[in-house]
Image (tube, coloured by chain):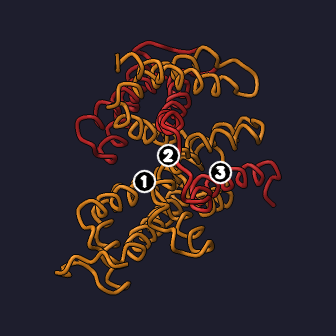
Amino acid sequence: MMDPYIALAILAVTLSSFVTRSGPLLISSRLKLPAKVEAALRYAPACALAAIVVPDLLFIGAEPNVSLSNPKLLAGCAAAIIFAASRSMIATIGGGMVVFWLARAVFGV
Amino acid sequence: MSDSLGTASSAVTSRDGFRHGVQELLPAAPGIFAWGLVTGVAMVKSGLGVFEASVLSLLAYAGSAQLAALPLMMSAAPLWLIFLTATIVNLRFVVYSVMMRPQFAHLTRRRRVWLGAFLADIMFVKFSTLLQRHPEQTQRVAYFFGGASANWVIWQVSSIAGILAATAIPTSWGLELAGTLTLIALIVPLCAERPVLAGVIVAGTVSVLAHAWPLRLGLLAGILAGVIAAFLADRGGQT
């Protein structure tokens, strides 16, 4: 049996998908978004992704490690540079993971 | 629709439209496949069960929202925060959905709901391009549905392949990091807009400073600060 909390969490993400994708298609097509709302809708997803990614890269346990001895941080920076240069998702993931593994081997963490 | 501009070089029947949509999506297939694979692996390696991860993938069909919700689920964050976080990451779908509305307005509610459920980043871009370059295309709904359903199939196959493969991959490889790396690849192109870049920097910094807040509320603080910074940067850029 699935853990009830996990089951509800899956439903929460599913509901969110449904509301954001199909919701606007069900509202009257005369409704237009104010420019400010449209801008906020454009900015928010990138901010949310950054707010998830940055702590994920910096924290190893309770303390943030903002130094070159942090393999996850190095991998994340490498991934950003590789994607900016190549626009290739495969190269980004592959290159980032290789940097991560190399840094881990070098720093022995 | 009577917007056909004479020479019908493009699709005529809905079947042709569907096929055209599938063809247009195929160049993106390797990228979609890699992303799905990584998302599948990352879900299981972060601690979600094979069955749970498969259900999440099939029902939610939202890679970035799934990856964003994952650490919250694993730290037993409140459900409302999981819903809110997934929704903020999904807000781009609201933008797409609002822009698609005139194209689907003539359809029944039920069909609109179905088409909306298949709305994803790549097909939205292709569809917008089609409207600009080939306004004579009459089989737009079939075209959209062709590409969008191809995207769905590629995504689900690769995601479930990743979920199954993950059980055979040692945890010590740290492959859950690959999920974070895909999110970075999503952020980078958005940063071409200066307000977004400002928002991303502030959101990242604030979420780190507020990391110790209870219920992972530091995440919300980061997003809020980021959006405010983006608006300020936007105003600064205009004057």
SS category of the residue bearing label 3: helix
Q: Marks 1 and 2, how far apart in space?
A: 8 Å
Picture colour for chain B? orange
Q: Marks 3 and 1, how far apart in space?
A: 16 Å
Disc 1 crowd, CA 10 A, few/some/many (<14, 14-19, 20+): few
Both labels 3 and 2 in a single chain: no
Residue shown at the point (57%, 74%) measured from the top left = B111
Place residue A14 in its image quadrant.
Answer: bottom right
Residue shown at the point (34%, 87%) measured from the top left = B13
Q: Marks 3 and 2, how far apart in space?
A: 12 Å
Q: Up-down: is A59 above or below B128?
A: above
Q: Nearer the viewer, residue B61 or B75?
A: B61
Residue A27 location, x and y as percent?
A: 62, 58
Name the residue that disc number 1 marks. B121
Disc 3 crowd, CA 10 A, few/some/many (<14, 14-19, 20+): many
Name the residue that disc number 3 marks. A16
Q: Earlier in the sequence, mark 1 or mark 2?
A: 2
- At label 3, which amino acid type do we have? Ser
- At label 2, which amino acid type do we have? Arg
Place residue B78 in its image quadrant.
Answer: top right
Residue B133 location, x and y as percent?
A: 23, 62
Please give the chain letter of the residue carrying mark 3: A
- At label 1, which amino acid type do we have? Asp
Q: Does residue B222 appear in the picture of this structure?
A: yes
Place residue A87 in its image quadrant.
Answer: top left
Q: Which mark is residue B92?
A: 2
Q: Could you tell whether B133 is left or right of A4 in the image?
A: left
Q: Which mark is residue B129?
A: none
Q: Up-down: is A25 above or below B18?
A: above
Q: Could you tell whether A80 is left or right of B204 in the image?
A: left
Badges 1 and 2: C-beta atoms under 8 Å apart? Answer: yes
